[in-house]
Every structure is written in structure tokens, then in C-alpha cells.
Image: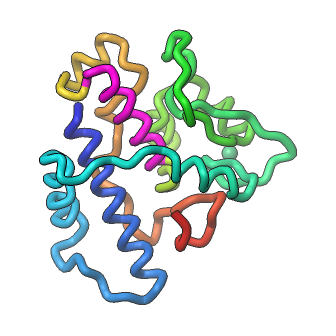
Amino acid sequence: MEDHILWSYSVLSISRKVMKQLKTGETGDYPGGRTKAANILMSGYQRRQKNITSLDRDDALAQDGAHVCMHCGCISPRYHWDHLIPRSRLRGETIPLNQVRSCPGCNLSRGDRDLMTWHRQRQTFPTLGVLRRYIKLCYFYAKERGLLDETADDAVANGLPFDPRELPRRYPPIDQLVWDHAHPTVGRG
Ligand SMILES: [Zn+2]
């Protein structure tokens, strides 16, 4: 399961860097493409030369961001709190920083489906900000319970509340990605 998580996180990190470069007009550092760069980054995580950082920064950004639906970006007269790892699958456990502001439409449409299953079924892709938070939640959930070395198949069969096999292995082209609806300028984060 760890490889599913680290790979998705590595591609996300590289995509984020490329987005920033395009925004600032820098030339790319990744002539080999995102996949090659993500491979190098992933081996750093695997060898524990790099670590996935805590959710503190993600939370601070969410706190001072615009009040919009984190899934679709719409402005709604009222919001729900959507649990990135579905509450119903957590069987009473509470996970800090698991909630994002969501319009009622997105929240009700998703129900208790796995975040990425929901996106796949409606052919959308999350913002990188939401996805980064979600991948971190999954990683720390598995790490704290000693599950990182389990196969994803076994862990899901044993009641894991998210599906690591659904984490994106490939990301859409950079110009189709959104960093964060609450922080439309990519410079933050
Ligand atoms: Zn929405």
C-alpha cells in the first residue's frame, strides 16, 4: 500500500512544481517529464531521505482561504463539511483535519463513496490541494496503524476506510489541473 500512496504523492508534488514554474514563466527542470522526476522523488521517500510533511500547513491554508466548495469551487449559500475519508467507514474514529467545506450538491452526490471512486465515476479530478490533504490523511492513517506494508488488497478486505488502489497513478495534463479553489493563485501553499 505504501507504494500506491508514495507514488501518487510524488506525482502530485512534481505536478505542483511544474504548475508553479509555468505560472512564473520559468523553464522546466524536468526534461524527462513528470514520470521520471516523480520516480526520483519517490525513491527519496522510500529510503526515508524525505518524509511526507504533517497536515498543519494544509490546515492553515484552508483556514485563511476563500469560503467556496473545495470540490467544485462554487459559492453556496450554505456548506456542509465533507469527510475526505468517509466518516461512516471510520466506525466512530475521528481523524483530525479530515473535513473540507463542500456545497450540499457535492456532499450529497458523494455520499460515503471513496473520494477517488466518486471523482472517477463522475469523470472529474480533485484539486491538487484537496488531493494532497487526502493522500496525507491516508498515509498517516496507515502509518499510525502499522499498515503501510500490507498489500492494498488485504488492507481493503480488512476494512481500510479508503482505497489506496484508487489513488491516481497518472495525473491529467498540467493545464487541466487546479491547485486549490480556496486559493486560486497557485503561488500559495
Ligand atoms: Zn461543490
How has the structure been colored for display? rainbow
Q: Position of residue 169 (x, y in %)?
A: 28, 48
The image quadrant of residue 15 is: bottom left
Question: In the image, what residue occupies the spot 53% across and 51% down?
Answer: 58
Question: In the drawing, does residue 55 fall left or right of residue 35?
Answer: right
Q: Where is residue 166 in the image (x, y as percent from the top left)?
A: 34, 36
Depth check, front residue: 184 or 148 = 148
Q: Where is residue 122 in the image (x, y as percent from the top left)?
A: 52, 41
Q: In this view, does 109 lie above or below 189?
A: above
* Residue 174 forms part of the magenta stretch: no
Question: In the image, what residue occupies the spot 52% across and 26% down?
Answer: 95
* Residue 137 forms part of the magenta stretch: yes
Question: In the image, what residue occupies the spot 60% across and 56% down?
Answer: 61
Q: Which quadrant is home to the N terminus?
A: top left
Question: In the drawing, does residue 85 fall left or right of residue 51?
Answer: right
The image quadrant of residue 46 is: top left
**Does residue 124 appear in this view?**
no
Mostly what secondary structure, the magenta segment? helix
The image quadrant of residue 157 is: top left
Q: What stretch is highlighted in magenta?
A: 131-147
**Does residue 128 appear in this view?**
yes
Looking at this view, name the residue that lies furthest to the right.
77
Q: In this view, does 33 lie above or below 166?
A: below
Ligand 1 sits in which quadrant? top right
Q: Is residue 62 above or below residue 122?
A: below
Question: In the image, what residue occupies the spot 37% across and 33% down?
Answer: 140
Question: In the drawing, does residue 170 fall left or right of residue 183?
Answer: left
Depth check, front residue: 72 or 159 = 159
Q: Where is residue 91 in the image (x, y as percent from the top left)?
A: 51, 10
